[in-house]
Amino acid sequence: MTSHAPLIIRRAQILLPSGEFMLGDVQIQDGVIVQVNSEISPVTESPVTEIDANGLTLLPGVIDPQVHFREPGLEHKEDLFTASCACARGGVTSFLEMPNTRPLTTTQAALDDKLQRAAQKCLVNYGFFIGATAELLPDLLQATPVAGIKIFMGSMHGPLLVDQDEVLEKIFAQGTRLIAVHAEDQARIAQRRQQFAGITDPAIHSTIQDNQAALNATRLALQLAQKYRRRLHILHMSTAEEAELLRQHKPAWVTAEVTPQHLLLNTNAYETIGTLAQMNPPLRSPHDNEVLWQALLDGVIDFIATDHAPHTLEEKAQTYPNTPSGMPGVETSLALMLTQAKAGRCTVAQVAHWMSTAVAQAYRIPNKGVIAPGYDADLVLVDLNTYHPVRREDLVTKCKWSPFEGWNLTGWAVYTLVGGKVAYDRGTLHTDVRGQALRFESD
Ligand code: DOR
């Protein structure tokens, strides 16, 4: 690797691995943190780049473990370049992307194509899931590098839907790599879709794909994970019932995540933002919000993902049920959660744990998620002193909308560093910066 000039971040409130903060400096060399100290003496080497972080807080860059970036095949909604720009603006330095692109990411060839595109276009680091199908393609176990196997147990049409028990059983029985499930009971959803056919109020979405549908699938996935002692991750957990199930018994090899939407929005959002509030699994009740928060605080839920799933405003302007499900999220997730921390709901250190450290641990991504010598310099400097609203005109996601428009947030990224390079700085994207493919230990 060629040697680059050192970079020193000075006078930041640095989040230490202990969860405490220290006012000090961080020195970066060749993309890696080499020193964290209360004061680093001036480096004699020249040139040296310095960032004055006075008044800013330094956190490990966000690792968003569930996004849908639409490339290849659905680039009218988003592409890897625009999505990674949105990541950089949001303080997200790595992402794990889902296989429901076109073609579906179910083979090594499709995975290689995504990796190649990402290497050319992404400002931040990238990793991909391989999608399970009923065909049980050999690449499901062999393709590499992958974050894990994604199973859509429900809410999906086409070959990525895996809703037959015997196929699920086979997938859990084969191999050892992590299985991440979108847990909704497709048979129940199909039956309820018929029952409520003809209703065009998008609020019916949460009734059709109800709490029971989520609970049924999560229970089944947990049973299979128990039976085969298989690493299981429950994606975007949305209901009080699932949280209580996990609270009663959660094997050490099972993890779960929640989205900011399921913590902060509920079915009241249909009244204000209509179909923009439509996602899968759907928004739930204020009671579900509360139980999910408590489960997160208690460690029953391990970390946070956005499920960034952009659709165009034109697509969202159709009439339910013709509207697609999904909301963008990478640009607002960190500020949303830090605003909650500032309001006393949790601590800043917990937010960094849920949005970076715990994700790196669960997916076995080496050298990320911690600010300490030897770790990659994927970092975000945030401003916890000022508030700015989410405004459509500021968004860089291609879809150009957010369910949180108008929310006044603090903790916005001021600088985002990817591998020691500044990818975003005070409103400017450095579009020449490129991330790297993530590695997964023992994938
Ligand atoms: O609402 C959603 N939209 N949930 C998903 O799991 C998929 C996503 C999409 O790709 O649009």
Image (spheres, grey):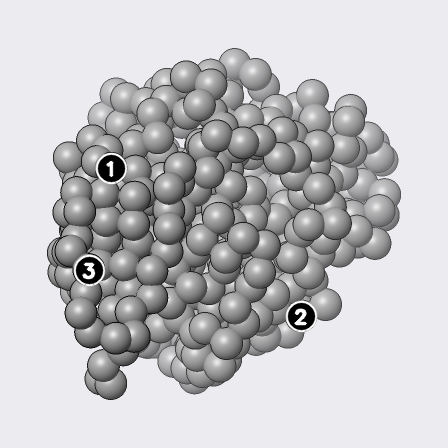
Q: Which residue is mark 3?
A: 42
Give the label on residue 23, or none.
1
Mark 3 or mark 1, whichever is nearer to me? 3
Describe residue 116's horizontal placement relative to residue 79 as left or right: left
Mark 3 or mark 2, whichever is nearer to me? 3
Q: Secondary structure at mark 1?
A: strand
Please state which of residues 417 and 47 is positioned toward the viewer in this rendering. Answer: 47
**Residue 384 rendering spot, x and y as whole percentages:** 45, 32
Describe residue 308's horizontal placement relative to residue 134 as left or right: right
Q: CA distance from mark 3 to mark 1?
A: 17 Å
Describe residue 271's horizontal placement relative to residue 128 as left or right: right
**Residue 395 rendering spot, x and y as whole percentages:** 67, 51
Task: Decide: few, some or many residues near mark 1? Use Cα within 10 Å; few <14, some 14-19, many ≥20.
Answer: some
Q: CA distance from mark 3 to mark 2?
A: 46 Å
Please state which of residues 335 and 228 is positioned toward the viewer in this rendering. Answer: 335
Report the amino acid beneath label 2. Glu
Q: Are marks 3 and 2 in contact (CB under 8 Å)?
A: no
Q: Secondary structure at mark 3?
A: loop
Residue at 27% from the left image edge and 27% from the top image edge: 299
